[in-house]
Amino acid sequence: MMSITLTVRHSRSGPYTRPVPKLWSETIQSHRQEVQEAILHTTARLVAEHGPLSVTMSRIAEETGIGRATLYKYFADVEAILNVWHERQIAHHLQRLTAARDEKHSPWQRLEAVLVAYALTQHETRDYRDTDLAALLHRGGHVSRARQRVRDLIRELLSEAAASGDVRDDVAPEELAVYCLNALSGAGGLPSNAAVGRLVAVTMAGLRARP
């Protein structure tokens, strides 16, 4: 692990008070980010292997290769580490949805791409949903905020697709967004990506505008 020591020199006229050179500042920030990333990845691995209730700060420090005092400078406890890790996972999932949306052009294709990405995320994260870790992490407000962002994204796409005549307009986009999220939450219990694709197709069929 990289270690950085800064020496503050004194001049005859008093302490050396000039700003820290930009290169030093950037190097320190980079080092801190590397340590934080190592802590997050180590904690996630230990929790996956042993469960959240069996992981201690001492074990995290040892596995990361840093001292306990250093670890406590970054995080107060294991739950704080896991919350930051979970927030990053959620941010990654949201980026995946927006990237899927931006890859397509027509409203219907954009809607389908986002629903596929959402369903696949549900399928890929199924192993941890009914665990102590899920119960611990889902207490945070960041989860409800993320759900609302996903709901808003799908509602906007439904509105666009309804305006283009692809999605039915006899049901409000807000209600259709709830329908999509509830239907695709079942992707976590499916055995394969192919089954996930079929679930998305059935869900999309319920959205189609009436002839």
Image: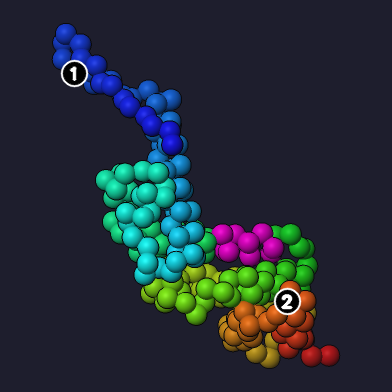
Give the image location of residue 126, x and y in percent.
58, 75
Give the image location of residue 27, x and y in percent.
43, 30
Which quadrant would residue 158 be assigned to in this image?
Answer: bottom right
**Mark 1 vs 2: CB contact within 8 A:** no
Whether 98 is among the magenta residues is yes
Nearest to the observer: residue 14 or residue 30: 30
**Residue occupying the far top of the picture:** 12
- Is 208 positioned to the left or the right of 151 in the image? right
Q: Which residues are magenta?
A: 92-101
| Residue located 50% across and 80% down the image | 130
Please identify the quadrant where the N terminus is shown.
Answer: top left
Q: Which residue type does callout 1 highlight? A: Pro
| Residue located 40% across and 40% down the image | 32
- Dot 2 falls on a residue whose secondary structure is loop
| Residue located 38% across and 32% down the image | 3
Q: CA distance from mark 1 to mark 2?
A: 65 Å
Which quadrant would residue 120 be assigned to in this image?
Answer: bottom right
Q: Which residue type does callout 2 highlight? A: Ser
Nearest to the observer: residue 173 or residue 197: 197
| Residue located 59% across and 85% down the image | 182
Whether 5 is among the magenta residues is no
Identify residue for label 1: 15
Which is the main secondary structure of the residues drawn in magenta?
helix
Identify residue for label 2: 192
- Residue 166 versus residue 46 in the image, above or below: below
